[in-house]
Image (tube, helix red, strand yellow):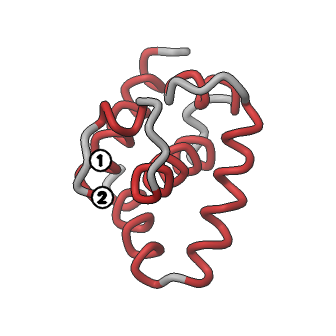
Amino acid sequence: MVHFKQTAVNKVLALTAEQWGITVADLIGPRRTGAIAQARQASMAICYWNGFGKSKDVAAAHNRDNHATVLHACNAVDSDTRHNATYKAKVMAITASL
């Protein structure tokens, strides 16, 4: 991954962790509790939508093996932002900070 893109992904990870009140280690770690999974999906979707890498690169940056995880995250975030105003506000705040 190009240095610019890796820096941008790291910024998204940091902003997402701050927004959800968790650590970056939680985002890239193996735990799948509700809040961590939701934050991880948001982070992956934001990275992918902003062109910070191909789906396989975004998955690798989040310590995931499968590019389909990123595509699933994009669909989940799209759906969740339509139905949950608080969630949408968090995703928009992260995107606005980039």
Classify 61 as above or below 12: above
Q: Is residue 95 left or right of residue 65?
A: left
Q: Residue at x 58, y 50 (%)?
A: 45
Q: Residue at x 61, y 29 (%)?
A: 59
Q: Foreground residue, 19 or 6?
A: 19
Query: Which numbered circle lies on residue 17?
Result: 1
Label 2 crowd (10 A; few <14 / some 14-19 / many >=20): some
Q: Tell me residue 43's x, y (percent).
A: 47, 47
Q: Tell me residue 63's x, y (percent).
A: 52, 24
Residue type indicated by callout 1 = Ala
Quadrant of the drawing holding the N terminus = top right
Q: Residue at x 37, y 26 (%)?
A: 7
* Marks 2/1: CA–CA distance: 5 Å
Query: Which numbered circle lies on residue 20?
Result: 2
Classify 32 as above or below 94: above
Determine whether the residue tagged by mark 1 lies in a helix, strand or loop: helix
Query: Which numbered circle lies on residue 39?
Result: none
Q: Residue at x 36, y 49 (%)?
A: 98
Q: Tell me residue 78's x, y (percent).
A: 65, 67
Q: Is residue 6 left or right of residue 67?
A: left
**Whether label 2 touches label 1, CB < 8 Å:** yes
Label 1 crowd (10 A; few <14 / some 14-19 / many >=20): many
Q: Tell me residue 3's x, y (percent).
A: 43, 15
Residue type indicated by callout 2 = Trp
Q: Foreground residue, 34 or 4?
A: 34
Classify 36 as above or below 24: below
Tally the numbered discs.
Answer: 2
Determine whether the residue tagged by mark 2 lies in a helix, strand or loop: helix
